[in-house]
């Protein structure tokens, strides 16, 4: 019965499957109250139907239903979706069959509905040739030219309508770049995403993604717009077309469109744009420059991806380069340059976050500290290059054992530390043993010698511990594992603390190298002697700054004299320049924070952007700031800074600075 009704329809479509037949019938015979349900059902059918003509017919029927519901902008959209599919079919047919198909399909009828909707229902005044039957190829070409997307969207009123539809369908109201800037934050990924969202609106792309490629050729998806499914992301990563252009647009009528992967084509992509973002400049904090690509995709026939819009998109390249450079610096500032695991600074921040989170959720976690047994012997016998290779391979073996939420950091030298959220003691021990065995069995140095690790574990155990206490426990457990014979895993218990050997305040102060430590002790003696010299206070401060700059590499060292929490004088010296230099700028927000809290800090100052490199990117500074306190009174603040492209201050630098100013603090009395 259904098939009989179907075949009785005037101009019924050919080659329908059963699902297509029922959807088409329902769209023609059901009443208005069911239109929305039927439209959604029809769109689901279209998502898996391969036959272009069936899709075109159903889209045309959807357009009619929206027209009856007086949703004219949606009607216009689906009429054009239908027309675009008919045009695709016409372009693929042999020359002799084009006229026959154009006249016998629903192409002309849908075109008529589209023109009526555009000019009469929506009040747009566009000129189209009145045609009931196409007689010649020239006439067909004229009709196709009228229906060309660029011709349709060249009409300003039509373009505004399509933008309005895009905004409502995709909740993208970034009408101007100022709205994007209003949403800028400290989160670089969010900033990149918002810029990409704005660019997508300009060209009416319904999906977008930025992907970077590392030196090993591996892809890293930085952020996406309206793409969340991993399989879909992987499909779009196959959008690679040979082109010498840095930016190129591919539309369905472009010959290159058929070079795209078949699986991608089957997803119904109408157009895509591909922009390479490359900056080969390397920094000390980053092993590589930027090698990224920005991909815009649309499955909609009404889109503005073309060679004209390409010019607009290209204008954003320097800005995106800037944001990606900032992202790279942010990431690299959290990573250990040798092993690729997190650095100590990031780990300490992650631990503070986990402590707060565990307290709020009343959950348990573990801190695991391990180091390589007899690592000094590796360096002494095989050299530091081999030692570095061992560190990298050990870190890689540990990563194989870790879960997604675990965090590994290099704590210093051959010492590593792992955060294990939401684990009990048994799970932590099991992981520790797995790591220990994995490293031992990896035979990292082959037959030269065994490489093993000793591991100490501290559990939060629902106690009110601070970050220093739980790290101290893990370190004490590690020390016990070493003392008990090495190559073993020990969980902290009360008796571990009796033999603890940690002293966080001295981390980085003494290196273990006799000659280096002897020179450091001489430096301390000289600093202590500065206060006894018969010279002005200013000369003493100058000599103190010289000694500090000789010990800790920095561009600028500045001392702010403080009285009653206010800065009353400033002394600043730049590297390789004699005498004082007060031309430098400082982040007084950080200085005032140290004055108020009487607590130092070391970080990358992302907020100050006073100087720029040759690419116009901000030359961010790494800063190390410490209060100078004597007899319980805050006397001054010392501020060290250096370009992040040269160095980033770490905990060791901060500890050394504190040690030096404590020795020389009496200089500031009186």
Image: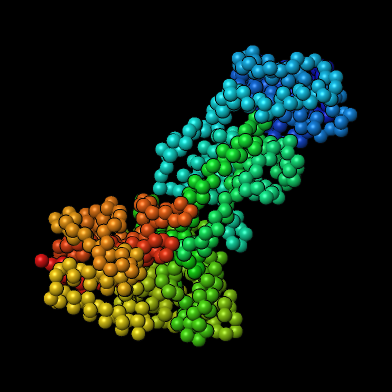
The residue drawn where x is 54% and y is 68% is: 396
Q: Residue furthest right?
A: 96
Asked whether 555 or 217 is in front, the reply is 555
Asked whether 572 or 105 is in front, the reply is 572
Residue 305 rendering spot, x and y as whole percentages: 63, 36
Position of residue 297 in the picture relative to residue 279 (left or right): right
Residue 368 in view in this figure? no
The residue drawn where x is 54% and y is 82% is: 450
The residue drawn where x is 31% and y is 84% is: 518
Residue 299 rendering spot, x and y as whole percentages: 66, 35
Name the image quarter holding residue 263: top right
Residue 41 rendering spot, x and y as whole percentages: 67, 28
Residue 209 rendering spot, x and y as whole percentages: 58, 45
Report the quarter where the C terminus lies.
bottom left
Q: Residue furthest bottom?
A: 381
Position of residue 202 in the picture relative to residue 455 (left or right): right
Name the image quarter holding residue 355: bottom left
Name the image quarter holding residue 605: bottom left
Q: Is residue 523 above or below residue 646?
A: below
């Amino acid at each position: 019965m259904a098939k009989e009704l179907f075949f009785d329809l005037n101009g019924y479509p050919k080659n329908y499957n059963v699902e297509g037949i029922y959807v088409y019938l329902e769209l023609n015979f059901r009443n208005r109250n069911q239109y929305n349900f039927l439209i959604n059902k029809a769109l689901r059918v279209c998502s898996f139907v391969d036959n272009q003509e069936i899709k075109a017919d159903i889209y045309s029927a959807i357009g009619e239903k929206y027209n009856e519901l007086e949703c004219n902008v949606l009607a216009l959209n689906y009429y054009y979706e239908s027309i675009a599919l008919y045009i695709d079919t016409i372009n693929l047919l042999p020359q002799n069959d084009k006229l026959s198909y154009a006249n016998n399909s629903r192409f002309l009828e849908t075109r008529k509905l589209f023109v009526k909707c555009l000019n009469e229902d929506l009040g747009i005044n566009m000129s189209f040739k009145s045609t009931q039957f196409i007689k010649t190829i020239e006439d067909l070409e004229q009709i196709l030219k009228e229906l060309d997307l660029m011709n349709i969207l060249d009409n300003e009123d039509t373009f505004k309508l399509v933008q309005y539809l895009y905004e409502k369908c995709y909740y993208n109201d970034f009408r101007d770049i100022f709205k994007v800037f209003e949403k800028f934050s400290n989160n670089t990924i969010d900033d990149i995403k918002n810029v990409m969202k704005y660019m997508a609106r300009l060209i009416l792309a319904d999906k977008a993604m930025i992907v970077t490629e590392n030196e090993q050729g591996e892809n890293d998806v930085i952020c996406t717009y309206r793409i969340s499914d991993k399989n879909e992301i992987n499909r779009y990563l196959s959008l690679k077309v040979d082109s010498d252009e840095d930016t190129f647009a591919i539309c369905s009528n472009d010959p290159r469109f058929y070079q795209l992967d078949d699986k991608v084509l089957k997803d119904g992509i109408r157009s895509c744009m591909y922009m390479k973002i490359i900056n080969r400049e390397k920094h000390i904090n980053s092993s590589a420059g930027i090698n990224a690509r920005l991909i815009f995709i649309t499955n909609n026939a009404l889109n503005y991806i073309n060679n004209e819009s390409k010019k607009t998109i290209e204008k954003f390249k320097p800005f995106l380069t800037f944001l990606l450079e900032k992202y790279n610096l942010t990431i690299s500032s959290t990573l250990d340059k040798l092993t690729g695991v997190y650095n100590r600074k990031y780990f300490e921040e992650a631990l503070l976050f986990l402590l707060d989170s565990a307290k709020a959720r009343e959950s348990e976690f573990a801190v695991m500290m391990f180091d390589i047994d007899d690592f000094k012997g590796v360096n002494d016998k095989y050299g530091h290059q081999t030692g570095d290779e061992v560190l990298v391979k050990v870190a890689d073996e540990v990563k194989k054992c870790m879960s997604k939420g675990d965090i590994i950091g290099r704590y210093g030298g051959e010492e590593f530390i792992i955060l294990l959220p939401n684990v009990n003691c048994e799970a932590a021990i099991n992981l520790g043993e797995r790591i220990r065995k994995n490293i031992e069995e990896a035979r990292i140095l082959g037959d030269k010698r065994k490489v093993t690790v000793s591991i100490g574990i501290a559990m939060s155990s629902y106690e009110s511990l601070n970050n220093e206490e739980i790290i101290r426990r893990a370190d004490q457990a590690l020390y016990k594992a070493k003392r008990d014979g090495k190559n073993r895993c020990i969980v902290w218990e009360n008796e571990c603390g009796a033999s603890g050997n940690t002293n966080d305040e001295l981390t980085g102060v003494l290196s273990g190298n006799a000659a280096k430590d002897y020179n450091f002790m001489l430096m301390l003696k000289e600093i202590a002697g500065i206060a006894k010299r018969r010279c002005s206070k200013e000369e003493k401060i100058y000599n103190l700054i010289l000694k500090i700059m000789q010990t800790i590499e920095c561009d600028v060292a500045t001392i702010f004299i403080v009285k009653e929490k206010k800065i009353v004088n400033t002394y600043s010296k730049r590297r390789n320049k004699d005498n004082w230099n007060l031309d430098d700028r400082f982040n007084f927000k950080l200085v005032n924070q140290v004055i108020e809290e009487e607590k130092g800090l070391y970080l990358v100052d992302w907020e100050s952007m006073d100087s720029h490199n040759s690419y116009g990117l901000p030359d961010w500074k790494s800063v190390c700031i410490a209060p100078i306190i004597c007899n319980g009174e805050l006397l001054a603040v010392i501020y060290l800074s250096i370009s992040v492209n040269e160095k980033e201050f770490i905990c060791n630098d901060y500890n050394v600075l504190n040690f030096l100013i404590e020795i020389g603090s009496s200089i500031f009395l009186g």
